[in-house]
Image (cartoon, rainbow, N blue to C red):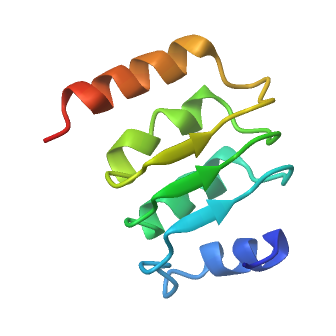
Amino acid sequence: MYELATYRECLADAKYSFSQMFAVNLTATKIADGQFLLLLQRCPRLRQLDVSSTPLTDASIVHIPTHCKNLQRLSLCMNVGISDVSTRDSYAFAFCNSP
């Protein structure tokens, strides 16, 4: 797996898509909301995502159902910037609208 510095470099370069990546663990990294959105857009096949103990906010979480249609496991533990309301609303919508 890449280290965060490498993620930042790769996310800044549009030629990287990460289209074959199925699992991402960003636990305790300092990934920002904008970087996270780029990662979601470039990882369409994600099945597992761990963003525990990161500075992500509700602004990021609402994009997960849109970009991660195959997601099976999500960990959001210890994130003070993410509210119960955003996770409930995002995933209620995702599960109600899944095929």
Point out the residue furthest to the bottom here.
15
Question: What residue sits 49% from the left and 69% below the top?
Answer: 22
Residue 33: x, y in percent?
65, 45
> Quick check: 20 above or below 90?
below
Question: What residue sits 41% from the left and 26% below the top?
Answer: 90
> Quick check: 56 above or below 79?
below
Horizontal relation, residue 44 to residue 23: left or right:
left
Q: Quadrant of the C terminus?
A: top left
Quarter holding residue 95 = top left
Question: What residue sits 52% from the left and 19% below the top?
Answer: 86
> Quick check: 61 above or below 1?
above
> Quick check: 55 above or below 14?
above
Point out the residue furthest to the top here.
85
Question: What residue sits 29% from the left and 24% below the top?
Answer: 93
Q: Quadrant of the N terminus?
A: bottom right
Horizontal relation, residue 65 to residue 23: left or right:
left
Residue 65: x, y in percent?
37, 40
Horizontal relation, residue 75 to residue 29: left or right:
left
Quarter holding residue 52 = top right
